[in-house]
Image (cartoon, rainbow, N blue to C red):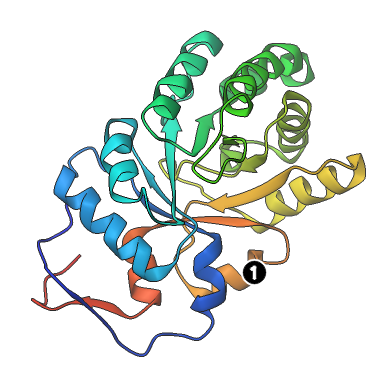
């Protein structure tokens, strides 16, 4: 699925709520078929909307970083996406390459299958994975001279409540800045009960880790359900455009 060609955008009946929500949205296009021109259009809209970041595939990081170099909008990319099956060393190398290419934020997919297999015994192995990537991120600076942000995707929709607690503790102990619910590539995305478990686990530990809700969130009613618990939303560009009343001047569907 590609963004259709257009040269200009019109905002129609923009919700006043979105002016507060856009700055905590990762504006996402992770389609393998998206072209460089699609990413440039995404970035130009991102600047107009004032979103927190654009989230693109690693191969598109340099294009996005160049387009957004004079903008406040950050460049986010995904690592070991969507399976999470790469080794800790491979994930660290992939993160490092993305950062050198201009990524300000890294969304790394945890090997959540190990939690399913080993439960609490997965902690040390997965802690090592998170810690290796966190070290790479935190030894580099983003465009605002802050440490590169690491968000760890745990695919919470595939985990039991107890496994969500385990995943949250692993992310905390490994030094992640955020725990993220989902890649959006499985049948179950963000679930309110799982986010509450993350929130309470973080609160009880005294950790400063934050939560990013993503996967299946596409309207204001869903956003309002999660807003008390999360600091960031991952949303597909089409849903964000719709919520902001964006339409293309040539009436293309996108």
| The quarter of the displayed image where residue 196 is located | bottom right
Q: Count the labels in the image.
A: 1
Looking at the image, residue 56 sits to the left or right of residue 40; the answer is right
Q: Position of residue 90 (x, y in %)?
A: 46, 12
User: Of residues 208 and 197, which is closer to you in this image?
Assistant: 208
Left or right relative to 180: residue 254: left
Estimate how packed mark 1 is, as few (under 14), some (14 to 19) or many (20 or more) residues with alpha carbons within 10 Å. few
Query: Is 101 situated above or below 238?
Result: above
- Name which residue lies at 76% across and 30% down: 166
Q: Residue at x 55, y 12 (%)?
A: 88
Q: Is residue 185 left or right of residue 207?
A: left
Q: Where in the figure is residue 140, as x and y percent of width and height?
A: 56, 27
Query: Could you tell me which residue is drawn at 65 percent across and 64 percent down?
Result: 226
Give the x, y percent position of residue 70: 37, 53
Image coordinates for residue 142, horizontal then vertical, percent: 52, 38
Q: Residue furthest bottom?
A: 13
Residue 30 is at least partly visible in this image: no
The answer to whether residue 75 is above or below residue 133 is: below
Depicted 101 relative to depicted 1: above or below: above
Residue 44 visible to an observer of this rendering: yes
Q: Is residue 137 above or below residue 213?
A: above
Q: For this rendering, which residue is in front, 21 or 169?
A: 21
Residue at 39%, 34% in the rendered image: 102
Say whether residue 243 is left or right of residue 41. right
Q: Which quadrant, please, contains the C terminus?
A: bottom left
Q: Dot 1: what SS? A: helix
Q: Write down the quadrant of residue 41 in the picture.
A: bottom left
Query: Looking at this view, is 145 or 153 the one in front?
Result: 145
Residue under circle 1? 225
């Amino acid at each position: 699925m590609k963004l259709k060609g257009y040269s200009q955008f019109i905002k129609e009946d923009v919700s006043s709520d979105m002016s507060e929500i856009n700055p905590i949205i990762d504006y996402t296009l992770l389609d393998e078929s998206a072209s460089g021109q699609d990413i440039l259009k995404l970035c130009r809209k991102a600047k107009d909307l004032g979103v927190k970041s654009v989230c693109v595939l690693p191969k598109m990081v340099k294009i996005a970083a160049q387009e957004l170099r004079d903008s406040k909008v950050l460049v986010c990319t995904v690592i070991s996406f969507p399976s999470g099956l790469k080794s800790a060393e491979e994930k660290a190398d992939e993160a490092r390459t993305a950062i050198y290419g201009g990524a300000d934020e890294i969304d790394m997919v945890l090997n959540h299958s190990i939690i399913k297999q080993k439960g609490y015994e997965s902690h040390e192995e997965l802690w090592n994975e998170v810690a290796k990537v966190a070290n790479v991120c935190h030894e580099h600076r983003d465009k605002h001279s802050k440490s590169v942000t690491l968000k760890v995707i745990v695919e919470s929709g595939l985990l039991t409540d107890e496994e969500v607690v385990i995943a949250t503790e692993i992310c905390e102990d490994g030094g992640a800045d955020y725990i993220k619910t989902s890649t959006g590539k499985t049948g179950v995305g963000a679930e309110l009960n799982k986010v509450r478990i993350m929130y309470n686990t973080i609160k009880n530990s005294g950790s400063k880790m934050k939560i990013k809700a993503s996967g299946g969130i596409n309207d204001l009613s869903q956003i309002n359900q999660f807003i008390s618990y999360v600091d960031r939303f991952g949303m597909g560009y089409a849903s964000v455009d719709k919520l902001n009343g964006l339409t293309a001047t040539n009436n293309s569907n996108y």
